[in-house]
Amino acid sequence: MSLTLKRQVQVRAKISAVGAYVPPRLLTNADLEKMVATSDQWIVERTGIHERHLVDRGVATSDLAVEAAQRCLQTRKIDASELEAIIVATVTPDMMFPATACLVQDKLGAQGAWGFDLSAACSGFPYALQVGAKLIESGAHKKVMVIGADVMSSILDYTDRSTCILFGDGAGAVLLEPCEDGEIGLVDFEHEIDGSGGASLYMPGGGSLNPSTAETVAQKMHYVHQSGGAVFKVAVRKMSELSETLLRRNGLSASEVDCFIPHQANERIILATAERLGMPVDRVIINIGEYGNTTAGTIPLAMHTALETGRLKKGDTVLLASFGGGFTVASTLLRWEF
């Protein structure tokens, strides 16, 4: 089979640059052995994670987002003043309001840009990518910055080994622009949510249902709560199903995908999904060992890893897949154009 463009649009959107940033401070498995009842072997065998990066006190999601965005702009050799919109995918905003996108816009000096936050947990980046693409395809804008950033350490209970071993802090950013003649860019997407899975991965405190009180803090309601077994099974099945649907709709088989960039939640989830798709492992980008699960940051960070290691190049057919709290699921098909 060969790629068949089903969605006909007058203007197509493409990723024209990528930037990534993680804070310098490391939390290794050896460090965690001193904090909770765990071991390096236990963590690596079950997750594939060796270390993760954490912010210092006073460093917020907007700071990571700005660092990633600046690197993206430097790669593209343009100024922040040229940006027209900024979308920040995050579940750890600096505060409830204003939106982190507003803070990023100010820190970047992108006076001409408007923007907003998007909350879809680990699927936040691919969801934001499609929203940004539609701003390009509509003809409304020509330069849209899409950022996935999270400071997960701010909502983790470091006495709970089931969650604190999994997550790290980080951010990635991409610039969206219109395709030039002969370019394809973003091809198609498949998204899904299932709210019945909400209680399997969530943070119960701090919203309108359970406003912050001394009691909610004492009950640890402001931390991530996860049912790992339930998440694992559904993640593999749903990422595979949506990706298969997307490939089939566009006349492709898994063997024709040059680069598979999945959400970095757990190495076993990644490998099980790739196996179910029939995706050769050498085409799968895995960097969870270095960063852990950075939630909205994982896919753009993995894009950066793929570029840095020479595994992503112009003309490649790329498949993205993610699964997150909600449940939220996403699969994205695109042609890499730089």
Image (tube, rainbow, N blue to C red):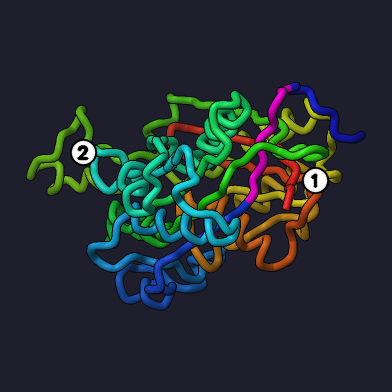
Query: How far across and how far down the image is residue 19, in percent?
Result: 54, 58
**Classed neighbour count for the residue bearing mark 1: other residues with Cα under 10 Å, few (<14), some (14–19), many (≥20):** many
Front residue of 321/266: it is 321
Q: Which residue is mark 2?
A: 206
Q: Which residues are magenta?
A: 9-16
Amino acid beneath label 2: Gly
Query: Can residue 91 be found in the magenta stretch?
Result: no
Which residue is drawn at the image coordinates 47% and 32% (left, top)? 327
Tell me the distance, in whole angstroms, between the alpha carbons under discs 1 and 2: 42 Å
Q: Can residue 244 be seen at all in this image of the molecule? A: yes
Q: Which residue is mark 1?
A: 257
Query: How far across and how far down the image is residue 86, in percent?
Result: 44, 41
Amino acid beneath label 1: Val
Query: Can residue 10 be found in the magenta stretch?
Result: yes
Which residue is drawn at the image coordinates 84% and 35% (left, top)? 252
Q: Is residue 115 above or below residue 313?
A: above
